Image: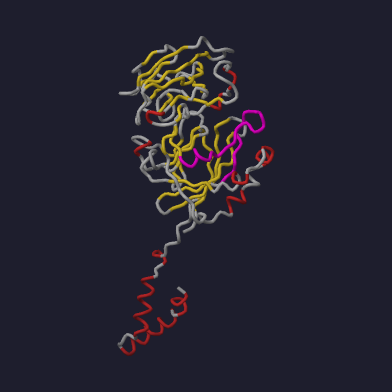
Amino acid sequence: MRFLIENTSQLTLSTDAMSRNSFVPIPIVLASSLLLACNSSDVVAPRALDNGTFTVDARTGFVYISLADSAIVNPGPSASSSAAWDIALFATNVTLNGGQAGPAGVTGYCVCQNSNTAPSNDQWLAMTAEGEAVDFDTMSAAPSGATFVSDVLTPALSGWYSGSGAAATANQDALYFVRLSDSSGVAKVRVVALESPTATTAGSLTLEYAVASNGATAFGAVQTVTLDVSTAAKSLDLQTGQVTSDAAAWDLRFDGYEARVNGGISGSGKGGAAKVTTTTFAVAVPSTTAPNAFRIDSYAGVFGATPFYKYNLGGDNRITPTFDVYLLKRGSTVYKLQVTNYYSPTGQARFISFRYAQLAG
């Protein structure tokens, strides 16, 4: 453009010469062509890199976000078939639109600049969004050798058996609290036996469980039930102790070697599960596990392997962000993301704040 501005007088003079001598000098043709080619309306500024901050109300269900559009979206006809979103959040669950979770091919990697140094509880609690911004701001490119992973099914109830095939056995010491699908209470559950397991199914499995209604200080009588999953999945209503085909009434479903709860991506209920490691099945009471320790079935990859939070560091059942930086990759586009808060200004949980920015190149 500087060439054109400096040669405007030359163009005028050449035009006068054309009227006197009836010829068009070559410089006039070149300058005119450049003027047309570089019309200001044709100049396109480089696209700004996507960046911003979000605070989402993730109390009651997944919130789906498009980072490229910097917007909350409503994927249809279903989240698992829509490419409109990149990341979804519900309570402490984070799902990326890729792998088993969706068709967009989004993968994730945790830089984990904080978790890799193994801070003490006091050090975790002393971290702030402002103080940890430097780690986010200085992240300019994916580290060499970064391995991005896709999301897979992550059941809330896992670890109830060990081994595989005919050698699989029940982990009798693995204790779980299961929130009922209608949220009317909680059950303590353990798998005590497997019979005739194969490479693809747990065969017949025997459960011990006891139910307590909301507010109860003790569990009811211990019940035993055997589910034959050798040929088909079985759904159990813990309140009645019966196998059910009701899409809403079930609490636990066993299919092969998968255990599902009626909540999250597995069902329409409010069910969830928490693994209890501080007591045994025999003496556990309903108050053993805090309500926010329950997890739902979800799809997870990097956020399942390296959660964005620590729980109960101060003995107050609160969620504390790790402030680790995560990288999200969609096609050739890479974003950095850092969760900065889990609470609203008034202290309500599940109001998740994060910042993100697209990396150049």
**Residue at 39 percent of width and 70 percent of height:** 38
Is residue 255 placed above or below 39 in the rendered structure? above
**Residue at 42 percent of width and 11 percent of height:** 240
Q: Is residue 320 magenta?
A: yes
User: Where is residue 326 drawn, in percent x and y?
Assistant: 52, 46
Is residue 33 placed above or below 246 in the rendered structure? below
Looking at the rendering, in which quadrant would you find the N terminus?
A: bottom left
User: Where is residue 169 drawn, in percent x and y?
Assistant: 44, 26
**Residue at 61 percent of width and 48 percent of height:** 133
User: Where is residue 164 drawn, in percent x and y?
Assistant: 40, 31
* Coloration mode: secondary structure
Furthest-top residue in this view: 221
Image label count: 0
User: Where is residue 95 drawn, in percent x and y?
Assistant: 45, 38
Q: Is residue 93 left or right of residue 24?
A: right
Furthest-bottom residue in this view: 21
Q: Residues in magenta?
A: 301-324
Q: Is residue 146 magenta?
A: no
Which of 352/250 is in front?
250
Is residue 257 placed above or below 67 in the rendered structure? above
Quadrant in which residue 150 is drawn: top left
Quadrant in which residue 19 is drawn: bottom left
Q: Is residue 11 left or right of residue 51?
A: left
Furthest-front residue in this view: 167
Which of 339/271 is in front?
271
Q: Is residue 173 left or right of residue 345?
A: left
**Residue at 36 percent of width and 82 percent of height:** 28
